[in-house]
Amino acid sequence: MTNQTARNLTRFSRMLWVAILLLGASLVSALIDNIGPCDVTVITEGNFSLEQFSTENNGIWTYVKVPSTESTEYLESMIYTITPTECYGQYHVIMYYKNYGDQEYKLFTDEDAFDSTNGHVTSITRGEPRIVLRVYFLKYVPGIYIYYYICSDEGGEKKVDYRYVMAHGPLSDDDKSDIQCLEEQFQFSGVLKDI
């Protein structure tokens, strides 16, 4: 391989990464446009520990329920990864998604999450635009599942309340019943769908 060929491959590789990062940023921006303000009063899980949550299954969680929206219509699966950074209470979060027909996972969002205690987490997207998200962990069953609500005062017109369920396996009937009770308690708009 000549030096010129190596330089061309390096340039191509950089351009490919820039394109991937821009695609991820545009997906986050599209999602944020619909998230809307934090106008639902919620009670968070008092015993939630972001540190413990980040160590379960090596910090890898699988989404099992997502809000039913246009952006999730063709969603086949989503994966959430969280790793601690060198700063105490700060974590690096990356989410990947795959739509039906996709061969590989794609970057959904790349964020820095900050533990705000008692089930409250502030997350800031990396790249431009930097968007501040508020995450409220509503139900945490260690080793089984987590149910959370996310919002942003930087978002646009809200179509549904964005809440998600992640787990390490299938939910039991009791788990599903608990989530449904919380859905009714908080009177969230929109419905959750299984993925």
Image (spheres, rainbow, N blue to C red):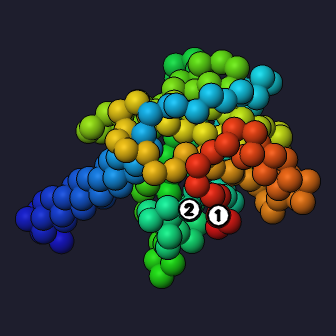
Q: Of callouts 1 and 2, which one flags the residue occurring earlier in the amino acid sequence?
A: 2
Q: Residue at x 18, y 71 (%)?
A: 1
Compared across the picture, whether 138 is left or right of 143 comes to left
Furthest toward the bottom, the residue is 101
Q: In which quarter of the image is residue 13?
A: bottom left
- Considering the image in quadrants, where does the C terminus appear? bottom right
Q: Can residue 24 be seen in this view?
A: no
Query: Secondary structure under badge 1?
Result: strand
Marks 1 & 2, CB-CB < 8 Å contact: yes
Q: Quadrant of residue 116?
A: top right
Compared across the picture, whether 185 is left or right of 14 comes to right
According to the picture, the residue beneath numbered tag 1 turns out to be: 193
Q: Position of residue 103 (x, y in %)?
A: 47, 78
Nearest the viewer among 150 and 89 is 150
Q: In this view, does 75 lie above or below 190?
A: below
Q: Quadrant of residue 108?
A: bottom left
Query: Secondary structure under badge 2?
Result: loop
> Disc count in the image?
2
Q: Position of residue 71 (x, y in %)?
A: 44, 63
What's the distance in space between the residues labelled 1 and 2, CA to CA?
6 Å
Q: Which residue is drawn at 43% across and 45% down?
A: 158
Q: Position of residue 187 (x, y in %)?
A: 67, 43
Q: Is residue 96 visible?
A: yes
Compared across the picture, whether 141 is left or right of 27 comes to right
Q: Is residue 44 above or below residue 125?
A: above
Q: How crowded is mark 1: few (under 14 residues within 10 Å), some or many (20 or more)?
A: some
Compared across the picture, whether 10 is left or right of 77 comes to left
Q: How crowded is mark 2: few (under 14 residues within 10 Å), some or many (20 or more)?
A: some
Which numbered tag is attached to residue 68?
A: 2
Amino acid carrying label 1: it is Lys
Q: Which residue is drawn at 86% across and 53% down?
A: 177
Q: Which residue is drawn at 75% across and 45% down?
A: 184
